[in-house]
Image (cartoon, grey):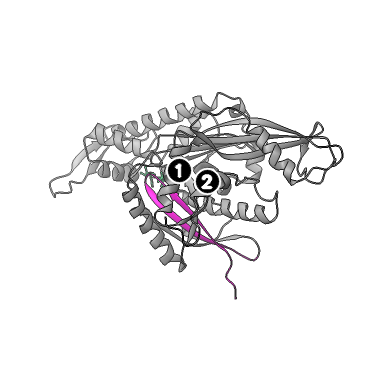
Amino acid sequence: MARSPIIVGLEIGTSKICAVVTEVRDDGALKILGVGEAPSRGVRKGEIVDFDTAQKCAREALADAEAKSDTEIVSAWVGVTGSHIASFNNRGVVQIPPERGEIDEQDIEDVKTSAREVSLPQENHFLHSIIQHYSVDGNDGVQEPVGMLGSRLEADFHVIHGVGNRLRNTIRCVKEIPLEIEDVALNGIASAMVVVAPQRKQLGTLMIDIGGGTTDYVLFSEGAVVQSGVLGLGGDHVNNDIAMGLRIPINRAEKLKIEEGSALLGNCLPGETVTLQDETGFAGREIERETLNTIIHLRLREAFEILKRQLESETYLHRLGGGIVITGGTSLLHGIDSVVEDVFNLPVERVHAQEMAGVTSAFLNPRYSTAIGLAKYGQAVLSDRFSPNIGDRISATVRRFFGRFRRSKGEQP
Ligand SMILES: Nc1ncnc2c1ncn2[C@@H]1O[C@H](COP(=O)(O)OP(=O)(O)O)[C@@H](O)[C@H]1O
Ligand SMILES: [Mg+2]
């Protein structure tokens, strides 16, 4: 019996590299066959700074995923991130020739191209153009313009772009693993695909994926992506602050944060301490719990205030009926939801991938949201390719731009 198509999502995170192997079931659901991971090295704030080291880690993660899913991985949908990522909203317009009068697929492509006709910094390239709304002859709210009669097609897009060379670094690094790249997608867009429910998108929701070195965010309003971006801040900065503040090594700072830390202030008894076990066998050191929590709180509060200021360049933040959802490894930190709630004055919920079949314990972990989302993105693009305008309407135009990085059979990496 022919096996269903295998779709692999690969996230090269700052903390871990994660590969999720999925297959599309007959009923169209995506089933997780296995999740492989390895600690990440050679990656800074979501961008690869040491190819050899990062490739070694990626090979480990892929081998782990192959073993756990009993499959051979030949290609993947790869996530990109970095603080160079930027976005804007723009409207495209095309005139339909009167002799035709009917909107076709090419018009959809042309209206997208038209929305991209803005001057980007020279070194930047488009990553995504995500459709928000179509309008035919001034009639808003058109869901499916192909086949409609009209003379003027307009479409609003959320356009995401980034520095070409910085995007290519990830692509080249993966290619040299060697691994074929199906396509790349912004990490935040991938996470949002599996952690934000359709109803929430409609109500208006801010998704924040807080990882180790980056915080990736996507804001939905009336069902459409209207703001997105990346901050070069995450849980690793909390680790650094704890290490500096308490004068302990980074790895112990991270362990202390995960096992004992909280982002809540005033949540412990006066003078309450935690014992930091000495790894060399000497007596442990007492650390004031309030000191630890204050360090965590201040750093996170600062990060969310920066994010809030960034989002306040537009007005959507004040119309979020669906509140805020947080995911990514740092969303597991005790009390982080209260800090976000406090800064934004909106309800906050911790979320992980939804509606997936297969390995339950794996997809319930918010650390895997991006990698699972990348597989979901792959599924959406593949179904889009065979049947246009289905799925979340995320275009794979990046394939064209990055096409020459795609390794064809027999080609040397
Ligand atoms: N249980 C936990 N509590 C608090 N922080 C956690 C927990 N688990 C992981 N983290 C933090 O999450 C970050 C990694 O998140 P992750 O989403 O895996 O990052 P990335 O995608 O950037 O590699 C690290 O800073 C780590 O310390
Ligand atoms: Mg991540």
Residue 203 at x, y = what percent?
Answer: 66, 37
Residue 3 highlighted magenta (yes or no): yes
Q: Earlier in the sequence, mark 2 or mark 1?
A: 1
Visible in this render: residue 323? no
Task: Tell me if the residue at label 1 has its CB under 8 Å from ligand 2.
Answer: no
Q: Which kind of residue does numbered mark 1 sit on?
A: Arg
Which amino acid is tagged 2? Answer: Phe
Residue 103 location, quadrant: top right
Viewer-side residue, 170 vs 37? 170
Would you place residue 295 above or below residue 282 in this image?
above
Residue 44 falls in which quadrant of the image? Answer: top left
Quadrant location, ligand no. 1: top left
Q: Left of 57 or right of it: where is 324?
A: right
- In this view, the residue in front, 10 or 224, is 10
Q: Which residue is mark 2?
A: 402
Question: How many other residues sit within 10 Å of disc 1, few (<14), some (14-19) or many (≥20)?
Answer: some
Residues drawn in magenta? 1-26
User: In the rendered view, does 271 fall on the left or right side of 221?
Assistant: left
Q: Quadrant of the C terminus?
A: bottom left
For residue 230, side relative to residue 109 (left or right): left
